[in-house]
Image (cartoon, rainbow, N blue to C red):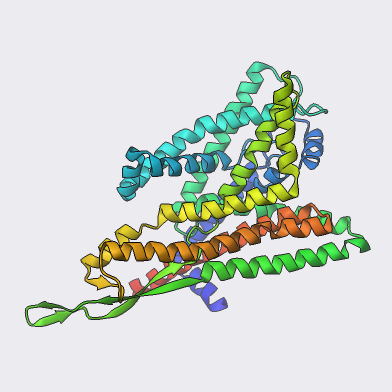
Amino acid sequence: MFEKFEKIWNTKEIRNNLLFVVAMLVVFRLASHVPVPGVNVANLRDYLAGNQILGLLNVFSGGTMSNFSVIMLGVAPYITASIIFQLLAMIVPYFEELAKEGESGQQKLNMYTRYLTVPLAFLQSFGMIRLLNNSARPILADLTTFRMITIMFTITAGTMFLVWLGELISEKKVGNGMSLLIFAGIVASLPTTLRTAFVNYTDADLYTFVMFALIAVVTVVGVVFINEGQRNIPVNYAKQMRGNQSFGGSSSHLPIRVNMAGVIPIIFAISLVLFPPMIAQFFVHARSAWLASLANHTIAFFNDHTYYGLMYFVLVFFFTYFYTAVIFHPQKIAENLQRQGGFVPGIRPGKETEKYLQTVVNRINLIGALFLGVIAILPLLVQGASGSTSLKIGGTSMLIVVAVAIETYKQIESQLTMHEYDRI
């Protein structure tokens, strides 16, 4: 292990890229402590502590909401915009064609995603301000129209600043920028969570701590197991004669990962499962009786651990399949194999190979999606047994942290391998 770290440090390009990424994460953490002026921070933190939904959002934003930071929304608007365009790429022909154009089409989709992030961030900032300011104890005093619009523009600019930071990090090819920003936010909140847990520790909490430790071990082992698991499909290449020389005739394999989507299903699921109750918060005190009743029922539905866990599991399961369909194209793989004279033993090249690959991916995804969904809701089950609200947040956070760490390590390792080939 230490030898690997030494190789990484001695490779100048990788070292510089890692130092740049660390510097960007430091900038992100510094920006998270730049508050919007005129906020009663004490009232805000009390409100977040008593609201389970916003408390979870605060954890994933790295505490930016508790500071009412200029980047309080994090990269949530960008993730929402990404979900929208990935759905459009599956149903709208124009966006479907862009997705098939390779790098140039992806650049256009990224541009459209950034454009959509701006109005989404503006609307979400408005909603967040109104939601927080409707609390019993005022958080923003003397909130005039001009001041509210100024704050909305500031928060929107903060979100786009994070999007820019995330893209700068992604360009260094040592990890996904948006995932690393979420990773940094979760890790930054860990010391505070542990300090609170140990300060308030009593002998009665021993059972909770033991269960939390077991969940942590199971989560880490499970995520590593799923991310490292793959199915190797054998591929043979037919011999081809060119003049007096023969080419091909070799055997290889096509690796199919159990979880191709990585941590993206968890991030997407969290974004969507928190959306309905947050919107419902606006209509709790609506003048219309039926609207207020609907809002209260929505909040009660998502506060129920059974329904919340079921919805969370279904969304993780769905997005595992959905994102795999976005990034894995069996038709292209079958066409490339046929062009290169490759075939799966016992399967005809072309359409039959495409159907076979799709069947294999669907079966593997079933295992990966079920396992990922179970790991996601396992802390909820333990929370119901122990009564600790920190377990749910800790388990989901750990799931993201481990998956992002594995993804980042793999990208760094691939960069190191490329540099070793260049030296040869």
Q: How many marks?
A: 0
Residue nearest the observer in this picture, 94 or 292? 292
Residue nearest the observer in this picture, 4 or 112? 112
Pinpoint residue 116: horizontal percent, then vertical percent.
Answer: 47, 34
In the rendered image, the quadrant that contains the C terminus is bottom left
The answer to whether 273 appears left or right of 115 in the picture is right
Pinpoint residue 55: horizontal percent, then vertical percent.
Answer: 73, 43
Residue 120 showing in the rendered view:
yes
Residue 69 showing in the rendered view:
no
The answer to whether 4 appears left or right of 279 in the picture is left
In the rendered image, the quadrant that contains the N terminus is bottom right
Q: Residue at x 49, y 62 (%)?
A: 365
The answer to whether 237 appears left or right of 134 in the picture is left
Residue nearest the observer in this picture, 26 or 62? 62
Q: Residue at x 47, y 53 (%)?
A: 323
Pinpoint residue 23: horizontal percent, then vertical percent.
Answer: 56, 52
Q: Is residue 26 above or below residue 222?
A: above
Q: Residue at x 81, y 67 (%)?
A: 210
Give the image quarter of residue 198. bottom right
Q: Is residue 164 above or below residue 234?
A: above
Q: Residue at x 49, y 55 (%)?
A: 321
Residue farthest along the left direction in this orientation: 243
Pinpoint residue 397: horizontal percent, then vertical percent.
Answer: 66, 55
